[in-house]
Image (tube, rainbow, N blue to C red):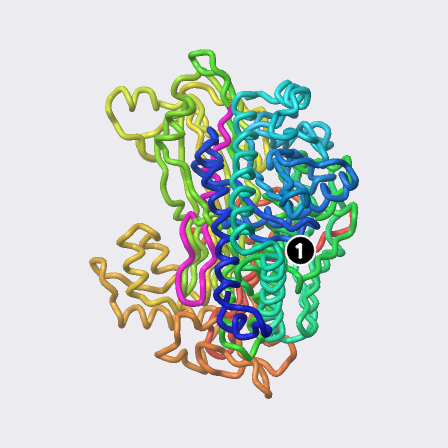
Amino acid sequence: MTESATGRLPAGFDPVTLEVIRMRLDSIVEEMGIAMIRSSGSPVITEAGDFNTALFDPTGRIYAYSDYVQFHIGSGSVAVQNLVREIAGEPLAPGDAFICNDPHTAGASHPPDTNVISPIFHGDELIGWAQSQAHLVDVGGMTPGGFAPGAHDCYSEALRLPPGVKIFEKGEPVEWVRRILLNNVRVPALFWNDVRSLVASNNTGIQRLLATIGEFGLDDFREYTRLSFELAEQVVRDRVAKIPDGTYTAEEWTEHNGHADELYRVACAMTKRGEQITFDFTGSSEQTDGFVNCSYGALVGSVATAVVPILAWDVPFNEGVMTAFEVIAEPGSIVNPTPPAPISNGHLTTGARVSRLVTKLMNDACRGSADETVRGRTQGVWADSWTGGISAGTSDDGEYFVLFNMDGGGMGAGAQPDTDGLDCAGMMTQVNNMLPDVEMNEMLYPVLYLWKRLNIASAGHGAHRGGLGLEFAWTLHGAPSAMQTVFAPSAQVVADGYGGGLPGGGSGHEILRRSNIAGLLAAGTVPTDDSLACDTRDPLAINQSSVQVSAGDVFVQWIAGGGGYGDPLLRDPRRVAEDVRDAYITDHTASAVYGVVLADGAVDAAATARAREAMRAARIGGEPTAPVAADAAAGASAPRRAADGWYCPASGALISTEDDWRQDAIVATRVAADRLGEYGVRVRPRGHGQRVLLEEFYSPRCGTLLDARIRVEAATAG
């Protein structure tokens, strides 16, 4: 607990006992995760950590939550609360366990994210719940792996398990339930072993929690956990209070619903009053018949994904952290759908857009704070989109396989006020993101990797550069063919930068048909972009299923990058030179984007200064009237407001006296794919419909890039 929180302890409470119980709960949920990893046979759990563990009180309030996947905060909480309502009055016993995965009735983020929830008894009294949730490799439905771009309703996507399905009773499997489940999945042995690993995780948590209560006594345990809730809530509310009151609005866009290459609006009005924030998603698109609808549980978790690291980065997570936030969403919308809306990828598409949207709203709100710490929570937007590739088929030895490739978690983080974004960081929700070893995937599945490298066309350039995404390629090795499902949620509408930082690049897939890979390998030649040839290149749609990959083809996937922070012309030239040397950027990018002139790898300081001045002049169509300060910090970002107007952070010049400084900025608007392409950043162009634009706002006095944001033009009446 933070020092400010422990300083407010009521009389009679011991801060040491408070902290010991709090840390004991945290260690219990971490040990639950270890038990799951050690008992599971799925690389999704053991290699990528796509799971969560938690402990709840009898009513469904969070005691403690593990640091693996944050948006499970919402889906896990909704699952426990819905279970409590569903089985009210039914008999319970130690050793019982319930299974659920239906987003509509159980709050799951999507059907593969399966919850197992077990009651905790102290004597005859129900004192809480242990909850474990993990992505299971297959849950039935029309497409292997549980992601169904072709589905028009939720009934096609998976076997739907509502709250209240008992899978273990008094420690023994409920056999008829087990038989039904295994009859509806493609990999029954792996599925059942993972269910048992979730039960083992819960059992570990139950044993450790009961031992803790035995040590401290039930009454003291309840009082100290209640106090932990209150202290966590107050710390968060204190920080909320430092944000200026007001209503902040923004929007994001979900791409391609699996059937149509359309854009679906995710809108939010964030109202901050005193110590409370309300996120109102009214105005978002209606639910669609594609798999991008986001369950309410995933919505709450996606909001938490952004607000927790921004405002509660050092607060132990429990129920109190979320009490200062209210989430409103219209039923029947893309962020709160009702049956029969398909929902199998809503959390990684629309849900991830919610996290990006909340980040933008918090950026807008925090930069107006008088508190330096709160202002420092601004950042470039994370790529926050899982680029998926699921392969299924029969290997040469006759074994059916489903590869849900967790390399899809290699997206870039947004740049920070004092540093570049992390490369291959994962989604904002993945606190403990891990990528699978190449050797592990090759051992378990009939694929051979040709490369796994950073995608240098993905980073959002800036004074601090956004994190790079991943790029990899594989060919089948030990199977004649496979059926491929892909989704690339951040292909056209990419992640914004902040304070003049540029947006990051997008994601995508292609298949190199009938390549020369066999000949290269036979000759002992390492395949490269130059040596690898093929008959045709087959770019895949943003969402596509039932794509055949044959032996001799090469499957390539690239993943989106994070947004930058601050004008690229404020980046230290020495760091640009290092980036070129380390192959993070090209020589062309160094000069065309950063204005850095290199001679034999070293910075030519005078030529760089002249180049940057020329670029600033070109931005505003004339010579700047206010010079950029020689000591302008790389973190100089958004305009600062004073009593008489807005001032440029780089030159100190007055920009505007209007309420919105952008009214007096010089604006350049271009199609995003074209403009970012000039910066060496790859974004998929739209072939029809609403255009995706990049707006760049420059200081009229000094030519500093103050803001660069993605905007989707308004739809026109047909």
Vertically, is 413 above or below 462?
A: above
Residue drawn where x is 47% and y is 18% of the image: 481
* 656 to the left or right of 31: right
Vertically, is 483 above or below 413?
A: above
**Within 10 angstroms of label 1, few (less than 14), some, or many (20 or more) residues?**
few
x, y percent for residue 355:
59, 54
Q: Can residue 686 be seen at all in this image of the molecule?
A: yes
Residue drawn where x is 27% and y is 19% of the image: 522
Q: Which residues are magenta?
A: 402-424
In the picture of the structure, the residue carrying the numbered disc 1 is 713
Which residue is at the front of the view, 330 or 657?
A: 330
x, y percent for residue 408:
48, 39
Kindly report the secondary structure that dominates the magenta region of the rendered protein.
Answer: loop
Magenta stretch: includes residue 577: no
* 479 to the left or right of 107: left
Vertically, is 559 above or below 319?
A: above
Three-letter residue code for mark 1? Glu
Q: Quadrant of residue 349?
A: top right
Q: Quadrant of residue 290?
A: top right
Which residue is at the front of the view, 591 or 647?
A: 647
Q: How many marks?
A: 1
